[in-house]
Amino acid sequence: MNRRKFITKTTIAASGVVAASSFLQQTAISQSVPIPSGSGAAVRPLSISTWWHGLEANRVAMEMMQRGGRALDAVEAGVKTAEADDKNQSVGLGGRPDRDGNVTLDASIIDEQGNCGAVAYLQHIVHPISVARLVMEKTPHVMLVGEGALQFALENGFQKTDLLTDASRKEWEEWKKEGKYQPVPNIENHDTIGQIVIDTAGNLSGACTTSGMPFKMNGRVGDSPIIGAGLYVDNEVGGATATGLGELVMRTVGSFLVVELMRNGRSPQQACQEAVMRIANSKIDLTDAQVGFIAVNKNGETGGYSLHPGFDYALAIGDENKMIAAVSFFK
Ligand code: ASP
């Protein structure tokens, strides 16, 4: 399946300018709009996750929450399914390495009280999300990176594992043969898992975990472990998470933007769309760059929107757990 669509830069710039100015007007008008009030009609529990691996993450999280489990435990267990899957080459074990052959992982987690934890450039650990949770729960800090994050993980009982599988090593060796540093961020290999859940008590938590951009520069960290960029949860309002080219998400603090837009009265769908439009207005070449957001508000309304077609997310409510193709800015 060819998931790429090529668009002229002229179209991108023109549409973006209109989008940005209408955004500013709407923001000015809606500044006094209160937080969305609880309708009482929300269906709980609920789980929303990026990409196809989101189905399994949703399944595991829903099972826990249907038994009364806490959102934070459910979301951690949910994304761990993708981290442990060695066939999944964009998260955890089996992730594609950087240009020097290192598999480096980024992850973040947020609970219903706004507590957050993150790790970046973490190597040799299958479950960076659990290390991020421990950073949140056991340290006075929010983020640990690199050697320090690994040291913290090992001190807390995590085992050192070789994360580079034969499949990812082979792809890396093929990539090296091209002989130039050109990690083209495209739609097919940007498959971070981000998940937001609401438990039966109505509390939200979120998690986001990735091996990042394949064949990135050694030391590169994306949006996924940056609180507010790859992930944001505000228990009064809702939560959002991002996938795609992290550099674009970071410069707009995308997930925070989505949640703030919801706070100001936008539906999750409108909020995701406006955040993507900010990026579309960046005037850089977006031909090969995918970005997708998913969001859920406190009432259990959900949304998803991406730059290009090809971004799918999984939504579980009640007994249903299904894939949804996100609406996209470019057609
Ligand atoms: N957002 C991630 C990053 O830039 C990649 C992805 O979503 O696949 O590191």
Image (spheres, rainbow, N blue to C red):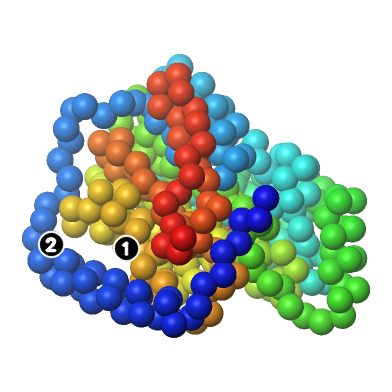
Q: Position of residue 235 (x, y in %)?
A: 30, 44
Relative to 70, 80 lies left or right: right
| Residue 30: mark | 2
Residue lying at 45% horizontally and 49% vertically, measured from the top left: 326
Q: On screen, 9 above or below 117? A: below
Residue pointed to by mark 1: 274
Q: Nearer the viewer, residue 219 or 15?
A: 15
Q: Nearer the viewer, residue 211 or 25?
A: 25
Is residue 122 at least partly visible in the picture?
no
Relative to 302, 6 lies left or right: right
Is residue 222 at least partly visible in the picture?
yes
Mark with earlier residue (2, 1): 2
Relative to 265, 134 lies left or right: right
Q: Quadrant of ligand 1?
A: bottom right
Residue lying at 35% horizontally and 59% vertically, measured from the top left: 273
Q: Amino acid at mark 2?
A: Ser
Q: Nearer the viewer, residue 110 or 259?
A: 259
Q: Position of residue 169 (x, y in %)?
A: 87, 58
Q: Position of residue 126 (x, y in %)?
A: 72, 46
Separation of disc 2 and disc 1 at Cα? 14 Å
Provide the secondary structure element on which disc 2 rests: helix
